[in-house]
Amino acid sequence: MPQLSRRSFLKRSALATAGAVFSARSWSQVAGANGDIRIAVAGLNSRGRGIARDFRAMRGVRVVTLCDVDTAILDREMATARAAGSPADAVVDYRALLPRRDIDAFAIATPNHLHALQSIWAMQAGKDVLHEKPVSHNLWEGPQILAAAKKYNRIVQVNTQNRSSVAIAEAIAWTQAGHLGKVTLVRGIVYKRRLSIGKTAGPVPPPPTVNYDLFQGPAPLVPLRRMHFHYDWHWQWPTGNGDMVAQGNHQLDVGRRFLGDPGHPAGVFTIGGRFGYVDDGETPNTFLVHYDYPTPFLFEVRGLPKRPDQWSGDAGAAQTLGSSGGLAETMDKYLGLNIGNVVHCEGGYLTIPSNDYSLAEAFDRDGRFLREFRGAGDHQANFIAAVRSRRESDLHGPLLEGHRSSALVHLANISHRIGSRTEPGAIREQLRACPGLAEPFDRFCAHLAANQVDLEKTPAILGAPLRFDANTERFTGENSAAANQLRSRDYRAPFIVPQLA
């Protein structure tokens, strides 16, 4: 990213939000240019609810349709829309929306395993897409979405809101201008409370208000094995990707920006596991990831608190908190952060807390405060501006960058899934080849010991070290056969992601 002043960034954002100047002929060819942009929002239980609220408050935009496979959630959001004076249609089956001519764009906030299919279907139907992270549920899906956007000439914004942040844009420009010297390491931190999702004794029925076939979509139509239907799909591989996506996709994206938005890393190495409870979750709740870029990128995930007396491992507590936890006061911190990024430089460091991505702070090598950067942004308004202008270059969160950040999730998870349980001493021997991981691994072990996890009795999974070809987006060398098997999945008809690339 070139050096960018606060004034020029604000000016550019304001112009993009207001829309560009068009000739009468070109304006008439833009979706919604002579009227409102009409939006359908799919997936309403969490992010979609907020997206619908934001669009309702936006001039020149109408939320015309709400879609969810759970009629209880759909009824709730329909009531919200009516109370806001913005009535909308209610649809359970997403496919019914595709042929409608009264919809210009889709906001997709469904579970991860549905993103690629629903995005491509929308583009094939001539709709633009606001795409909640992650872009894909697996590596193979990313190139298919990119090919669809190109083939059908659609505007696709990834909802990584940090890319509309004035504060982060200023901090990147200031750092790249050399005020702290060379960037030596970028770190992502996700210390976010995640409780047990409980352990079922056998299959459980989905809620009676849910169309389970539509919910599963491309995933196998197998009996449900989780106590709480909503949100906890994040922690099971057929539908979710763990906290590398649930929270971490944002910090991965911020980290890539401070590295200069590079392409894919040359390799990945992981250490992790699911510790502290035995439940129906499959994804790691404690994770250490090293990405092989010219400037290293380290990522840390912790779902357990500082001490075991600060958490309850029962499913009832998980249900009360919606399984999302987020109890920051009980979590570890790194340089003052429990969730965010640290950019280490020769002459100091920057911290970027998650929050609303409206703050970044710079410190010298001794931790003395130097300066702050403040200012948020309107990511949804930027999407609407690009829908009107038809210029992909107007987007703050373009699809290609979203794909590359989501790919980091998949690289780490694949390394973990084909790894093996390894005693701490043997892991330390392996780390001799990657000395930068020794210190974070020591903290990893201390954190688990504080939670009474004995790594000698319950060893961590040492992920397979993987090499990755950025051009082919395939693994090479040792462990590549097993890793490439997890690049994609078996799709269930008729929910098959089209092969376009």
Image (tube, rainbow, N blue to C red):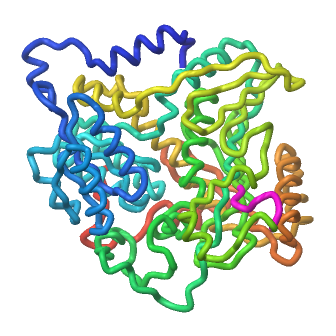
Residue 419 drawn at (x, y percent): 69, 67
Residue 373 drawn at (x, y percent): 63, 20
Residue 57 drawn at (x, y percent): 30, 35
Q: Main secondary structure of the magenta part?
A: loop
Answer above or below: position of 489 versus 130.
below
Residue in the picture at 55% in, 71% down: 319
The answer to whether 143 appears left or right of 348 in the picture is: left
So how many labels did they put on this image? 0
Residue in the picture at 21% in, 65% down: 93
Residue in the picture at 84% in, 43% down: 436
The answer to whether 8 appears left or right of 194 in the picture is: left
Farthest residue, direction bottom = 202
Answer above or below: position of 133 versus 26.
below
Let me know if residue 253 is in the magenta part: no
Quadrant location of residue 385? top left
Answer above or below: position of 411 versus 70.
above
Q: Which of 38 and 145 is in front in this view?
A: 38
Residue in the picture at 49% in, 30% down: 163
The answer to whether 278 appears left or right of 40 in the picture is: right
Residue 484 drawn at (x, y percent): 53, 62
Quadrant location of residue 92? bottom left
- In this picture, which residue range is highlighted in magenta? 302-308
Quadrant location of residue 281? bottom right
Q: Which of 498 and 376 is in front in this view?
A: 376
The answer to whether 11 appears left or right of 288 in the picture is: left
Let me know if residue 306 is in the magenta part: yes
